[in-house]
Amino acid sequence: MRAVLDACVLYPTVLREILLGCAKAGLYQPLYSDRILREWVRATAKLGPAAPVIAEGEAVMVRANFPKGLVKEMPGIEARLLLPDPNDVHVLAVAIGGHADCIVTVNAQDFPRHLLAEEGISRQDPDAFLCDLYAKDAASVTAVVRGVHATACQMSGQDIVLKSLMKRARLNRLARLMAI
């Protein structure tokens, strides 16, 4: 399975780490463009001046860990596409150019299912996407989630309740499937 990760699912750290952890586990091939990564880095600016620097370093790691996921910008494809938000056309172009099965996004209104279906692409919110991965390989998804949880606890210096972590990441259905 090939999935484009929209910038909005890369911005929350826990969600990004779970999504990319599942990709590292071989559960799917993440697709992205330099523009998607730039949008993610810019979005972190609201966290303070150091955040974009840290995010840029993490974007370098995404490029290094998933070099086959990089899809070059597709101006020819972009020119023929129409979406409610013209600023999201590049994401659909990446999906088409990368032969994606789906776009993982929380911006449902910007990616109408009928327009994506014309291109043979679906849209999934991150919770549904991860639930699908869990249905295919529960052990791997569970290992990724547990690893992200352990890292979050270690970095914060506190014992974080996993259910709370999942709730903040808006992964309520996945938490229920995992019986957290």
Image (spheres, rainbow, N blue to C red):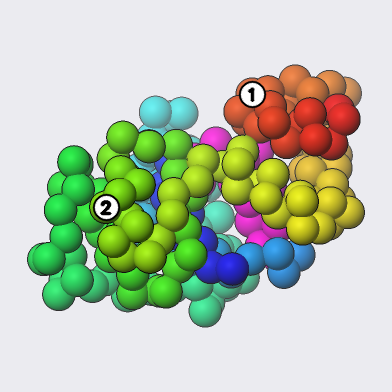
Observer-nearest residue: 69 or 1? 1
Query: Magenta part of the protein: which range?
Result: 9-24
- Left or right? Give the position of 25 relative to 121: right
- Left or right? Give the position of 121 relative to 22: left
Q: Can residue 150 be seen at all in this image of the molecule?
A: yes
At x 76%, y 50%, the residue is 134
- Left or right? Give the position of 64 relative to 49: right
Amino acid type at image mark 2: Leu
At x 77%, y 31%, the residue is 175
Locate residue 164, reporting x and y percent.
Answer: 75, 20
The residue indicated by pointer 1 is 168
Instruction: Classify 148 as above or below 66.
Output: above
Q: CA distance from mark 1 to mark 2?
A: 30 Å
Instruction: Classify 24 as above or below 142.
Output: below
Instruction: Classify 139 as above or below 45.
Output: below
Which residue of the protein is positioned furthest toward the bottom in this rendering? Answer: 68
Locate residue 102, reporting x and y percent.
Answer: 47, 58
**Image quarter of residue 165:** top right
Local secondary structure at mark 2:
helix
Local secondary structure at mark 1:
helix
Observer-nearest residue: 22 or 41? 22
Which residue of the protein is positioned furthest toward the left in this rendering? Answer: 79
Q: Can residue 147 be seen at all in this image of the molecule?
A: no
Locate residue 138, reporting x and y percent.
Answer: 84, 51
Screen quadrant of the C terminus: top right
The residue indicated by pointer 2 is 115
Amino acid type at image mark 1: Arg
